[in-house]
Every structure is written in structure tokens, then in C-alpha cells.
Image (tube, coloured by chain):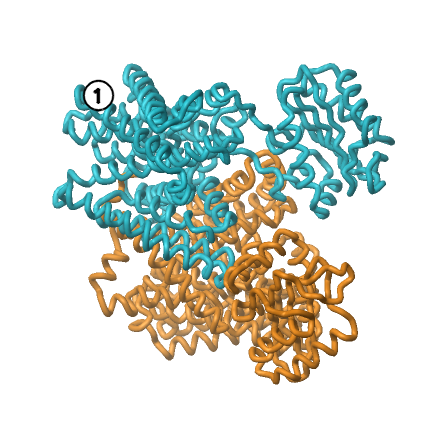
Chain colours: A orange, B cyan
């Protein structure tokens, strides 16, 4: 310590606090508007960066986020740590054993999905490099290779998340997509990492490629073997979870240092370390979650917001280039992957599904652009266009897949229950009056007629009581003219009589309305409620809650309501 | 990004990986030797710093941990972030409402325990400043104040941990000690923070003091109120746990920035923010845990190890000064607190108990010394002496309290069960043969005669079967000549007949031997086993484990076996 003086320390702490705070606030705003969180985080950076704050109050902006000097280096250190850990987490999502199991179809889609956009995108850029955003000092060769990579990249974590939301993850289609995205990523990052350093003095391309391939082979054989051996030992013997967290981070940081030292980019090493660790069946889901949550909650928002600090998205916004990149990027990726999928033997609508799924670029696309811009391979305006491509391609993937594959989104309790749907201390003497009171809330939220809702729920209740036992009841109905499910939760500390097999009075009542056409969501919601209320102390805490906010907090904090986050 | 070039990035990542990895390895070694983890982490730093590596291979050491330049600043940023978050966590342990409830006794112990060492230590240092380690350029006034603070500081988190281990935390004595340590900390850090900046140009002492007290008052009133209002909202509405993690960090970083800006040290602001947050009943234990685990597992080891990088503990080790500081520090703190406790109305052996408990200085003592050394208030040799005082005072507190208060350490399953005490796939046809096989392992570990152990366990089993139901049995015995408890766990996937109320064959057998004189540990262990095996999926996973290591990992990862960590 002691490298930073008092004023530098102030702007370091203040800069981090402002970045993190505004990224969280605007990320939440984006989520509520139905947009990916990453878009809100980006906007936070745009507001704080040269695009807005630097234009309104340049001196203040410069004090808060200095462009150089120790305070800039200090914030930079936290940002680059975030990027490395983001790639570590992305690597942990890769499942190599599935790659082998999927056979040649996956190989074709994965390699084709990488090589077609790479080759065609590269050729297009090589023919008119300056039109596509090469800096005046650049040379067309490296620029064309980078441009091809930028067209080819797919964001593994984002794709996995979208498939999960559509309940496609564990299907053949989902696995095929994930495997293909894994291969594409490996190829794209490999080419990109080699490219970045190959041009520098003292590094011949052949030497860098040989070293890189050697390191990749080493990590994926010896590294995987070591990770698989060490992880159970670390988890059994060291302090939990500090020991395994430390181990995972040491592997990631070590991998980053080694790849940086042999002349390719640090983040590729973190990505490889993640693959080696994530491939071990001994890496517990819980460990993955702790690292993931920390990266997702703290480091990724800082990193994403920090992007907006780099360049002005106003002065560097070139509409023509943005549109060209959006159109070319989407066409190359969707067509390239679909073509490769057909070659690999896939038929029907899934050919197009895999193309659109692979098109999501997420944060990885942004990282790629940022590094290329800093290495002066591309101009600011292309960086801006690539960031927009990453955001747009991510935002459209979910909706397009939903329509294309006629997938119905399966709604979960976590998404549906909010504090306006919670009623504490319900004043009701019997099941009918409780249902009437919750039904009014539900009908209002659904925009339906209250009498109709209550009639449907009471009708269902008459057929068979919905008491689950342990003081929980789930009155419900399926309605024709409902668009998305509605869940309302009421607590009745004094107990209400419901028909339930254990005869206990009911103190937690979930009223559930689902569309007639969506049985899957109803099943999902009922399953979640059963799991949630299985926990006796959680039931007690929920019943004791004094306000809708604390009722919701008690459920969410128990880990029972995991909100979808992207 | 872009502030660090490739070689700086390499040493940044490599430096962090090496610091974190060696801190974890040596921390674990220390724990196994029965020492506090922090001692092992310190030793890791000593090995990597100028004391050893810098002496053996100065060029390599300088490359890995440069003293200045961007890479040094980058590592520094991570270290100082760690210190700020450590103080944030320490602040979250403070419970202000308990301070009010404890009344005047606590006030007397807390203030007396701070002011007596502060005044006497300060006076002693003022009389012979250079003999106590003032730098030649220093002035006796500030030096004396700092020295007094260093004598007065108490480490809240470490004391809480020791009281917990001795099952004293929830007693009147425990609460009194915690409250007193809280007050002492507030006073000591306040004096220290003001001292650090008061001497600088442009800051008058009165102005800094007024500003500081104003800020403290603001945080403890408006800040607390705000935290209490915002926390439930954040926990109910934002993504869990990312939202609340972000909120806590923004508060800590913001507090740090503000105190640094008004002219006192950043870490005091993080500490205050921690108090404001921790005081809210809405700050869930789970949130506290996530922040705590991350700081404990990643940032604290890096910070502690980084201390060893600062100075050579070989050339700056001055035996005379180390002994003087150790003796004076211990006497002032133990006598001062005991005297204040007597004045406050406490009687009997607890008067001495509180004195020794308050003597533990932990990481906070080290942070204090480090900052003073960097501000050139003290010499290297005094910094080294203060680090040793912090380590020694922490290491002796537990054993001394145990003897003084005749407390028996309550052993927990987590501490007792290791992989050598696990037997998978036990080949046994009935309860007697299972007990015989596990009894042999237990007897060997306890250094007792196997026949004697088995006879005692079988005798107990005959009185009443120890099957808990759900396929779990807990044969046990209390033995005269046993020093500490022994637990051995066997799995029998095919089931063994035990007498249990549900008649299910037993597949998990915990054999427990406890000393005759220690009924509390037996109760604790049985309670932990009952909680652990309540979880059906955990039971399945444990029974399916193929090796002792994976058996232990399955239990520990479930969060069921929390190892004590300091």
C-alpha cells in the first residue's frame, strides 16, 4: 500500500462506488422494462462517461474518472480483474465431455459457425477496410482477421441463460447449441488472441501459434486432470467455501498470467482455466454459484459500466457503420450457422433456431471490441458499432427463438410474485372470503373481471380442496382470456379453514391464475410453491412478516425466489 | 482499460495468484498446527517479500512484486479494496443497540479500555519517543498519540470469533466484552484518523475533528435510518443476492471516499458504513455471510500476505523493541481494561477475563501499524513490532480465556470429522460388526484400547438403540481417559440392521466418543448430526460417495460442516 495519495484514493473509492451504484440502479430499470440488465449497465457508463457527464461537466468527470495516473490504473485493475473473472466464469460453463458425446453434427455446426462468419466477414473487411472502421494507421490483414472474429463470436453464458428460460437447455437442440457455441468460442478466442500479439515485435506468428496450441493442449489434458484431482481434496479439507474460492481464483489468475506471458491475451488463460475447472464433475454447483454471483453482482456491472467511460458514444456514433455491422453480423452468423447445421444433418425449423441462438454475443462481444480498440486494430466508431451489435443481438435472441420454435416461456414464481401481489394479515374467516379478497387483487392485476376470476377459482376449489398441508393452500384456476400468469400471496397469521389432508388451518395462501393454453407454467409455479413451503422456518418467517416488502424479502433471501437476471 | 501494458498485466495477475495461493496454503498449514490462519498468511508474505525471496532472488522478487509503477499500483488497488472491505465487515459486527442496552458498566469498560492504554501508552512514548521507534524526522506529539492508539486497539471480529468458540458470545460477559470492544474501536479509530490528517497542511485539527464528529453523527443517525429503510426494499425487489451485495459495497466504498475526502482515512468511512448497515435488523445473516466469505476467502488473505511484502521482517526485527512493545501492550491493555471493569462494577475472575479478551488485536492492529508506517509516523522496526504484537495477542487470547474462565472448548462435528475418520462402503452385516469396524478406527485415532472402546459403545447400544431414523445411527460412549472427542463416520450402501424407531436399515453410522467430563460437546455433536442428516438429498449423496474424500466433500459443501477459520 501507499502507491495512491489521498486525492487518488478518494477518486478510486468514489469512482468505484458511483460506477457500481449506477450500474445496479439502471440495470434494475432495464430489467423492469423487460430488457437485458446489461443494457442498463451500459447506459450507466454512457451517462458517466464522455458521452454525457464529460460533456456537461468535463472537470468533474475528469476528477471522478481520471484518464491516466495512479487512480486510473487502480480502477483499471479492478475492471481488468472483472473481465478475467468473467471469462473464467464463461469457461466454467463449457462442458467438454458433452462436446465429445455430440459427435460430428456438433463439430460441423461449431466449426462452421465459427469459420464461415470468420472467412466471409474477414474477406468483406479486407476488400474495404476503411469503410468498415479500420484506423488510418492500421493494416488490412490483422484488421480483416479481427473483423471476422467479431462476426463469429457467440456468448456462451448468455445463450445458456436464454435456453434455460425457454426450457430448451436439456433438450438435444439445447445441447447441440451449447456445444456448437463452445467450439465457436474456442476457435474465435484462439484466433483473436494469436492475432493480437502476432504483430508485435519479437513474436513471430508461427511461434505464438505453436505456444498457444501447446498451452491449450496442456491445460485441456494435464490441467483438467489436475483440477479433477485437486478439487475434491480442496473441497473436503480446506475451509469451506474460502478454500475452493481461493483455489478457483488462483487457477484463473495463474492462467491469465501465463497466457499474457507467452504472448496471447490474459483473458484467454482465464477462459481456459475455467474450462479445465468446469469440466470436473467435482466442481460443485455451489462453488460455481459463489464465483458467479460475485462476478455477476460486483465485477461485471463495474466492467460493463466502465465501457461507457472509454469513448464517447455520441461523437463516435456513425449510423451507417452501426447499421452495416448490425446487418452483416446478423446475416453472417444466422446464415453461417444455419448452413453449417444443414451440412451437419440437421433439418426443419431447428436449422434456423440454432442460427439465431448462436447470434447472441453478450458481454464477450464487448470485451473483444474493447481489446481490439485498445490495441489500435479498430477505430472508435467500429468499437461503438460492435458494442451495439452485442447489445442488439443479445436482446433479440429470446423473443425470436420463442416465436421460431413456438416455445412458450415458462413463468416462474420468482418472476411473477412482487410486493404489490402480497397481502399480509389477511382478514378472512373462511376459504371463500380469503379467495374473494385475494381474487380481487389478482383480477385487478390481470385486468379481468373480479367476479369471473372468483367464480373460476371457487369452482375449482369445490372440485377438490387445494390445501397442501402444513398450513399452505394454493387455490387456482386456468382462464381463457389471460395473457400471462398472475400469483397473489396472502398471509393469515390466525389461520383460515381450508380443506386439506392434515386439517391444519391455512396461514399462507397462494392464489394462482394461469392462461388456459399454458399448463406448463401452472405446473412450474405449483412445484416451486411446494418446494418453498417445505421449509418450516421459512413458513414461520413468511407468516410473521408485517409488510408485503418484508414478506417478499423473507422468501427471496431464503434463496427460494431466484430472479432471472438477464 | 489499457493503463497496464503486457508485462505489467502479467506481473499483476501472477502477483495476485502467487499471493493468494501461498496465503491459502500456509494459512491451512497454520490451522492444522492449531494456530490462527492469519499467522500462516503473514508467513506467506514474509517468504515472498524482502525478508526471504527478495534476499534470495532480488530480481525475480522485484519482477513479481514491483515496488512502484502501474503494476504496483494495480496490486495496491486490490489490497486497499481488501482493507476497506475488511473494515466494512468489522463494522457490520458492531451492534449499536446492544451498546445502549448494556448501560454504564459497558461504557466504563469501553471508554476506560480505550483511554487508559491511550493515555499511559502515549505518555510512555512521549517520554522516550526514539527508544519506542519514532523515525528521526518524526515529532513526538503525533508519535505519542499514535503509539497510544496502537496500545488501545481491540479487534472486534477476532474477539467475537473467540467468544463464539468458547460458547461465551451470548452470555452477559460476552455481550459486555463485545460492547466494550466496539466503543474502544470507535474511540481508537477516531483518534487515529484525525491524527493522520491533522498534521497535514491545510487541515487544522479542530476543523478535522469537527468534520469527523459531524460525519460520524450523520452516519449513525441519517445513515442508519436510510440503511434500515433501503435494505428491505433492496432485498425484496432487486436480483438476489447481487442487488444487496452491490448495495452494501456501494455504501462501503462511498463511505470510504467521503472520509478520505474530508481528511480522515478511507477505512474509517468503510467501518462507519458497516456499522450503519449492520445495525439494521433487515441485514440478513445470509448477506453478511456472502460479503464476509468473499472478504475472508479472497481479499483478506491477499491483504495479510501483502503486509510481508512491505518491509523486511529480518533486517527490521529489533528484539528489544519487539519485547518492549509486547510487554507494554499486553500490560496496558489487560490492566487498563480490568481496572476499568472494576470501576464499572464488575467483580471476580471476569474482571481479568475481559482484560485478556480485549487484548486481542487481530488484523486491525496490523492495518493501523501499516498506515502509520506509510504516513511516516513510525519506523519500520516499530511496524514489525506492532505486527508481532497483533499476532501474539491474537494467538494467546483463546487459550488464556479457556483456562481463566475454566471454559471447556465445545467441539463441533466440523472440527472433528476428517477423511481419515471416514469409511465408505462398510462391510458389516449387523450393528455389532459395524460398531466393531468403526470402533477400531476410532480407538486408533484416540490412542485407546480397541476392546475397551467397543465394549463401552456396545454397552450403551444395548441400553437403547441409537438409530435416529431415516437410515442414520449414532452409536456413542463417554470415556474417562479420552482427551478430545473422536467422531468416525461409516457408510453402508446396502444397509445394516440397527434398532431404530422407523425400522429402516441404517446406511450412515456416526460413531462418537467423548470425554466423560465433556457432556456439552456430545450434545453439540449429536445436534449437528441430527441437523445434517435431516436433509434427504444430502443423505443420498453421502451414502453414494465412493471415497472418504468425496464423502467429506459432500457433507462440507452442503454447508453442513462449517470449519472454524481463525
Q: Position of residue A211 (x, y in %)?
A: 49, 46
In percent of width and height, residue B362 lies at 39, 31
* Residue B519, quarter of the rendered image: top right
Residue B342 shows up from this direction: yes
Q: Position of residue B325 (x, y in %)?
A: 30, 20
Most foreground residue, B462 or B84: B462
Above or below B58: residue A388: below
Q: Residue visible at 60% across and 67% down?
A: A490
Residue placed under numbered mark 1 in the picture: B124
Q: Is residue B95 left or right of residue A469?
A: left
Sort mark 1 into few (<14), some (14-19) or many (20+) by Cα contacts within 10 Å: some
Which picture quadrant has residue A129? bottom left
Q: Quadrant of the N terminus of chain B?
A: bottom left
Can residue B387 be seen here?
Answer: no
Residue at figure coordinates x 20%, y 25% from the top left: B134
Residue nearer the viewer, B561 or B405: B405
Measured as percent of width and height from the top left, residue A228 is found at 62, 41
Pick whichever, B93 or A222, lies toward us.
B93
Q: Residue at x 38, y 57 (%)?
A: A20
Please tell me whether residue B454 is drawn above or below residue B414 in the rendered image.
above
Q: Chain ID for label 1? A: B
Q: Is residue A407 left or right of residue B303?
A: right
Q: How many marks?
A: 1
Q: Is residue B324 left or right of residue A320?
A: left
Q: Report helix, strand or loop for mark 1.
A: helix
Amino acid at each position: 500500500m501507499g502507491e495512491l495519495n489521498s486525492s487518488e484514493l478518494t477518486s478510486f473509492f468514489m469512482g468505484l462506488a458511483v460506477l457500481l451504484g449506477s450500474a445496479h440502479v439502471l440495470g434494475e430499470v432495464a430489467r423492469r422494462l423487460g430488457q437485458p440488465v446489461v443494457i442498463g449497465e451500459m447506459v450507466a457508463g454512457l451517462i458517466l462517461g464522455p458521452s454525457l457527464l464529460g460533456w456537461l461537466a468535463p472537470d468533474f468527470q475528469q476528477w471522478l474518472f481520471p484518464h491516466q495516473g495512479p487512480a486510473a490504473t487502480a480502477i483499471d485493475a479492478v475492471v481488468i480483474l472483472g473481465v478475467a473473472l468473467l471469462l473464467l466464469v464463461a469457461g466454467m460453463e463449457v462442458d467438454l465431455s458433452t462436446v465429445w458425446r455430440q459427435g460430428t453434427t456438433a463439430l460441423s455446426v461449431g466449426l462452421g459457425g465459427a469459420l464461415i462468419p470468420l472467412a466471409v466477414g474477414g474477406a468483406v473487411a479486407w476488400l474495404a477496410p476503411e469503410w468498415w472502421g479500420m484506423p488510418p494507421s492500421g493494416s488490412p490483414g490483422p484488421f480483416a482477421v479481427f473483423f471476422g472474429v467479431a462476426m463469429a463470436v457467440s456468448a456462451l453464458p448468455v445463450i445458456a441463460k436464454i435456453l434455460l428460460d425457454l426450457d430448451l437447455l436439456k433438450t438435444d437442440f439445447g445441447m447441440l447449441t451449447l456445444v456448437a457455441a463452445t467450439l465457436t468460442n474456442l476457435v474465435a478466442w484462439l484466433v483473436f488472441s494469436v492475432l493480437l500479439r502476432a504483430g508485435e515485435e519479437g513474436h513471430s506468428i508461427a511461434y505464438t501459434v505453436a505456444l498457444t496450441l501447446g498451452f491449450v493442449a496442456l491445460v485441456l489434458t494435464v490441467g483438467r486432470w489436475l483440477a479433477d484431482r485437486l478439487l475434491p481434496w480442496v473441497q473436503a479439507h480446506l475451509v469451506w467455501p474460502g478454500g475452493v474460492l481461493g483455489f478457483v481464483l488462483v487457477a484463473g489468475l495463474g492462467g491469465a498470467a501465463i497466457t499474457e506471458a507467452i504472448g496471447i491475451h490474459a483473458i484467454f488463460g482465464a477462459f481456459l482455466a475455467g474450462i479445465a475447472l468446469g469440466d470436473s464433475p467435482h466442481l460443485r454447483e455451489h462453488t460455481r454459484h459463489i464465483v458467479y454471483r460475485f462476478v455477476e453482482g460486483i465485477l461485471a456491472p463495474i466492467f460493463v459500466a466502465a465501457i461507457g467511460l472509454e469513448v464517447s458514444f455520441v461523437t463516435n456514433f456513425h449510423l451507417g457503420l452501426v447499421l452495416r455491422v448490425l446487418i452483416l453480423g446478423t446475416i453472417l452468423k444466422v446464415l453461417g450457422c444455419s448452413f453449417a447445421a444443414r451440412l451437419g444433418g440437421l433439418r426443419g425449423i431447428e436449422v434456423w433456431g440454432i442460427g439465431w441462438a448462436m447470434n447472441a454475443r453478450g458481454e464477450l462481444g464487448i470485451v473483444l471490441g474493447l481489446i481490439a480498440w485498445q490495441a489500435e486494430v479498430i477505430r472508435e466508431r467500429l468499437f461503438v458499432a460492435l458494442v451495439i451489435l452485442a447489445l442488439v443481438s443479445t436482446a433479440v435472441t429470446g423473443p425470436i427463438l420463442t416465436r421460431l420454435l413456438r416455445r412458450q416461456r415458462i413463468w416462474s414464481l420468482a418472476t411473477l410474485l412482487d410486493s404489490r401481489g402480497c397481502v399480509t394479515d389477511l382478514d378472512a374467516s373462511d376459504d371463500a372470503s380469503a379467495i374473494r379478497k385475494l381474487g380481487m387483487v389478482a383480477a385487478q392485476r390481470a385486468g379481468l373481471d373480479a367476479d369471473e376470476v372468483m367464480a373460476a377459482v371457487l369452482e375449482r376449489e369445490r372440485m377438490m380442496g387445494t390445501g397442501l398441508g402444513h398450513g399452505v393452500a394454493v387455490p387456482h384456476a386456468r382462464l381463457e382470456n389471460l395473457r400471462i400468469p398472475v400469483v397473489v400471496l396472502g398471509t393469515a397469521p390466525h389461520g383460515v379453514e381450508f380443506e386439506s389432508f392434515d386439517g391444519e388451518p391455512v396461514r399462507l395462501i397462494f392464489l394462482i391464475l394461469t392462461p388456459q393454453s399454458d399448463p406448463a407454467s401452472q405446473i412450474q409455479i405449483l412445484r416451486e410453491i411446494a418446494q418453498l413451503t417445505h421449509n418450516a422456518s421459512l413458513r414461520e418467517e413468511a407468516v410473521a412478516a408485517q409488510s408485503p416488502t418484508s414478506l417478499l424479502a423473507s422468501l427471496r433471501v431464503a434463496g427460494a425466489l431466484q430472479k432471472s437476471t438477464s
